[in-house]
């Protein structure tokens, strides 16, 4: 196996994850089998208990691992299916080292950062290698910024690892910032020089430098960076700000032939030039679609771009498959609570309520679901959005006026949504929800069956504690609610729908975690299509 390590310098949020994902996409289009993973220096065991305000969305894998949102980019940009082996934090490393010490596995040795902690980091690389013998190239993004004290052990581990597997099998890529000082009218290379110098102090010489820039990288600056950072000029690559969509990033990096630089460095230069026609076609549909729809996303973290990252990307995928631009209107659920759905949401072609936890803004979301139901606006509920739709239907159609969830009121008299039986008594909040890929049975002659092309079994990723309370099943079904899918093992409600509504579907799972650019999730595709039809675009054009 060949290894690529992506580090970052100068500032955070440079786009290391997008750079890693884009390189993975280009190498896949050259015919290589690629896998991407993330090493994060924070002390949390995983992001599962971290606030979206701190960390953005939690991305869930098939095996139930709660991971950084960058793993979503990795899976969307490549065909790889990732597992908990592909996400490592300092918290996991130290947890393992301390457990090993307590169990006597170090045979009485003094436990130290080197070699015990760095060995544990390297062990993860060897474990992933052993578990994926068919993978040609493993790309590892190192979170944080070079110079941060918490990342030093990871970088030292990579330095040792490169010696262990052979430097010829490793490519170090460093992502830095090229700021434009407007007063001087100049791009400054000094931050990049200093960042690379810090990396070289640790003992790592980057093979390729990716420069994040608002502008093209001229030859003078390219030459200066190459000289001061000890790399060839052709290995200084511009990573320009893209104008329309992140899916332009692989095409931008291809301009400087970064995939060719990588395969040459790793001795794999016999691979063919990538055929990017399918990717270019997708980008064209995103950038220049024929139609457009306005879809309101109503949530509690709506001001945070990364809180619903996979939702927005899935809408982009579905829009492209419908030759449609999806204009996302972000709506704060608390504003709906205060001013009413009609006033705050206005005229839209579709409404989506995503997942979430806690009771803030809940009444605003319930009012939103009612607004969509009563006005025949296409509605798509995800996780909490499904529970909200259930509560709203129970209150205003089935006249269970006190209907709520035990998440919001532990002593609820009418808990149409309740805590899963196996969740009762759990005190450890990390990795203790219903997580990962689960099998569901789809009932025939339903809208869900039609959307899933009449499949009787589906597999979707979950992340939740509360469920549809089966004690209310008969009453809600008598009121007209249709249960169109249930979990295969427990019979838990997975999809609800309203057959007399143009499009009113809500799922307990998270379909956004399985959507890809040229393979949009069927529920998202159907939702955008229904929104087009609601707008008045002929159904034949929404395909």
Image (cartoon, grey):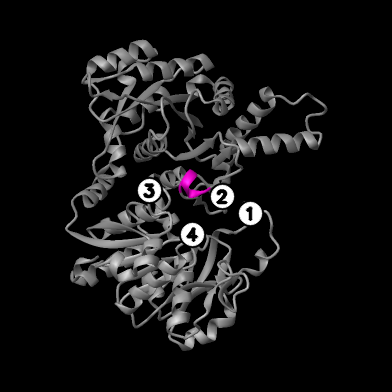
Q: Earlier in the sequence, mark 4 or mark 2?
A: 2
- Disc 3 is placed on an element classified as loop
How many other residues sit within 10 Å of disc 4, few (<14), some (14-19) or many (≥20)? many
- First in sequence: mark 4 vs mark 3: 3
Marker disc for residue 429:
1
Vertical position of residue 106 compared to residue 62: above or below: above
Residue 305, numbered circle: 3
Residue tagged by mark 2? 48
Q: Is residue 479 visible?
A: yes
Q: Quadrant of residue 255?
A: top left
**Position of residue 224 measured from the top left corner of the image (x, y, whole percent):** 30, 13
Cβ–Cβ under 8 Å for marks 1 and 2: yes
User: What range of the chain is rendered magenta?
Assistant: 51-56
- Provide the secondary structure element on which disc 2 rests: helix
Q: SS of the residue at dot 1? A: loop
Seen at 24% across and 72% down, the residue is 534
């Amino acid at each position: 196996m060949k290894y690529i390590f992506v580090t970052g310098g100068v500032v955070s949020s440079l786009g290391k994850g997008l750079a890693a994902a884009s390189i993975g996409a280009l190498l896949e289009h050259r015919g290589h089998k690629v896998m991407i993973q993330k090493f994060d220096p924070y002390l949390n065991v995983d992001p599962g208990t971290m606030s979206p305000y701190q960390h953005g969305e939690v991305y869930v894998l098939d095996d139930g691992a709660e991971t950084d949102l960058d793993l979503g980019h990795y899976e969307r940009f490549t065909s790889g299916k990732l597992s908990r082996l592909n996400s490592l934090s300092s918290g996991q490393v130290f947890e393992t080292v301390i457990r090993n010490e307590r169990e006597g596995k170090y045979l009485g040795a003094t436990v130290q950062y080197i070699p015990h902690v760095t060995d544990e980091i390297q062990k993860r690389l060897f474990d992933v290698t052993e578990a994926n013998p068919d993978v040609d190239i493993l790309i590892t993004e190192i979170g944080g910024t070079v110079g941060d004290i918490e990342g030093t052990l990871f970088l030292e581990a990579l330095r040792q690892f490169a010696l262990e597997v052979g430097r010829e099998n490793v490519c170090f890529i460093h992502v830095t910032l090229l700021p434009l000082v407007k007063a001087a009218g100049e791009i400054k290379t000094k931050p990049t020089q200093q960042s690379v110098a810090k990396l070289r102090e640790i003992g790592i010489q980057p093979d390729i430098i990716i420069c994040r820039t608002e502008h093209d990288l001229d030859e003078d600056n390219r030459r200066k960076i190459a000289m001061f950072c000890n790399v060839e000029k052709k290995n200084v690559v511009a990573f320009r700000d893209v104008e329309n969509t992140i899916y332009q990033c692989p095409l931008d990096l291809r301009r400087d032939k970064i995939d060719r630089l990588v395969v040459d460095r790793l001795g794999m230069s016999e691979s063919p030039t990538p055929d990017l026609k399918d990717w270019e076609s997708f980008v064209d549909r995103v950038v220049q679609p024929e139609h457009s729809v306005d879809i309101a996303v109503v949530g509690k973290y709506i001001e945070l771009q990364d809180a619903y990252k996979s939702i927005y990307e899935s809408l982009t995928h579905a829009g492209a498959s419908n030759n449609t631009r999806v204009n996302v209107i972000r709506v704060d659920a608390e504003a709906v609570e205060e001013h009413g759905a009609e006033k705050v949401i206005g005229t839209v072609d579709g409404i989506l309520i995503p997942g979430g936890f806690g009771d803030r803004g809940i009444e605003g979301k319930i009012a939103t679901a009612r607004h969509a139901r009563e006005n025949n606006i296409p509605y798509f509920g995800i996780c909490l959005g499904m529970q909200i739709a259930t509560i709203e239907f129970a209150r205003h159609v089935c006249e269970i006026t006190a209907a709520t969830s035990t998440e919001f009121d532990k002593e609820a008299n009418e808990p149409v949504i309740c805590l899963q039986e196996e969740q009762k008594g759990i005190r450890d909040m990390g990795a203790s929800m219903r997580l990962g890929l689960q099998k569901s049975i789809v009932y025939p002659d339903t809208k869900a069956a039609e959307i899933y092309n009449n499949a009787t079994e589906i597999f979707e990723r979950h992340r939740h504690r509360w469920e549809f309370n089966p004690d209310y099943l008969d009453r809600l079904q008598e009121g007209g609610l249709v249960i169109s899918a249930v979990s295969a093992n427990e019979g838990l409600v997975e999809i609800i729908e309203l057959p007399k509504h143009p499009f009113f579907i809500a799922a307990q799972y998270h379909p956004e975690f399985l959507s890809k650019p040229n393979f949009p999730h069927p529920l998202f595709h159907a939702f955008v299509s229904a929104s087009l039809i609601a707008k008045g675009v002929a159904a034949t054009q929404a395909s």
